[in-house]
Amino acid sequence: MAGVNMTGVSPKTAQVSDLIWKYMRPENMPHIWCPGCGHGIIMREVAQAVENLGIDRDKLMIVSGIGCSSRAAGYMDANTLHTTHGRAIAFATGIKIANPELEVIVLTGDGDASAIGGNHLIHACRRNIGLTVVVMNNSIYGMTGGQYSPTTPTGEFGTTAPYGNIDRDFDVAQLAIGAGATYAAKGSVYHVPQTVKLIENGIKHKGFSIIDVADVCPTYYGRKNKKGSAVNMMQYQKDNMVPADKAKTMTEEELKGKIVVGLLKETEYPEYTEEYQKIIDRFVKGAK
């Protein structure tokens, strides 16, 4: 690999490093994420999925909004767009309509996607437009100081919830399903191979796909809620994982505190840009 000394590195480690540098912009490193943050793991999961599918990077578009997670668009080497807070899906919708041949992936956080961006999320689901949305869900607003987010569990703490959050938390994947998403899945930063496969399948799916990835934020969420170190938080994911199929048979109480991993829904419905092209074709044919 040009410019990188791989002397003494095992072939497996070299392969991983090759993948990372192939899809990253070294000139923008080091990244700004805190030690132990799971965002880098998710970014690599996306890169691995793209590599596995053999997607031409000239036909790959990465879109992000604002937040810790959204810095990923500046680190990944593809066509990238770093947009305004909550508007990543809106920008991605415009890009996909303008050029349906592009593979458009949205990298977003739980606040960016389900708070200020919630309206764009539900309508992208409803339209079934061919986007793949990967939610880096760390249950907190990390970049702006640790405020509680729509996915902060009830009773947990944040800088804006010093006595505990009294709101019910969103299940982003189930919210998307309710809005019409034709592919919805949950992954985690611990269950890397499974999550890579879920992202792969989401990209291949024709229509709107969302992969809600359970993330770790030891700096704000972890400290505020006494979750321990990043290692402790990852161990919690390992110990409390529930396969999606099993989760369907469990009660809300039984699922409390559990990490669901797997496919929740996949169904077929006409993809938006293909239906839009039919209108254009009919107009062009009628005008001749």
Image: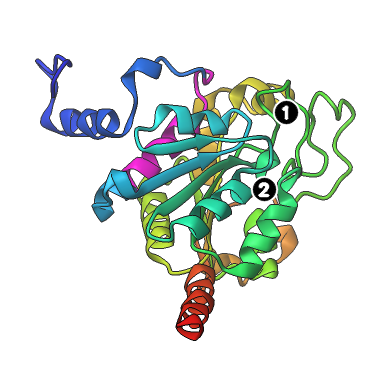
Q: Is residue 55 left or right of residue 64?
A: left
Q: Nearer the viewer, residue 17 or 64?
A: 64
> Residue drawn 46% across and 49% down?
105
Please tell me how crowded label 1 is: few (under 14), some (14-19), or many (20+) other residues with Cα within 10 Å. some
> Residue drawn 64% across and 28% down?
227
Q: Is residue 104 left or right of residue 112?
A: left
Q: CA distance from mark 1 to mark 2?
A: 13 Å
Q: Where is residue 259? Give x, y as percent.
A: 58, 50
Quadrant for the N terminus, please: top left
> Residue drawn 37% across and 63% down?
204
Q: Is residue 2 left or right of residue 169?
A: left
Amino acid under disc 2: Gly
Q: Nearer the viewer, residue 51 or 99?
A: 99
Quadrant for the C terminus, please: bottom left
Confirm whether the magenta stretch covers residue 193. Answer: no
Residue 184 is labelled as none
- The disc, 1 or 2, on the residue closer to the chain's N-terminal end is 1
Confirm whether the magenta stretch covers residue 41. Answer: yes
The segment highlighted magenta reads 33-49
Question: Please, is residue 71 above or below residue 8 in the view?
Answer: below
Evaluate whether residue 261 shows in this view: no
Residue 225 is labelled as 1
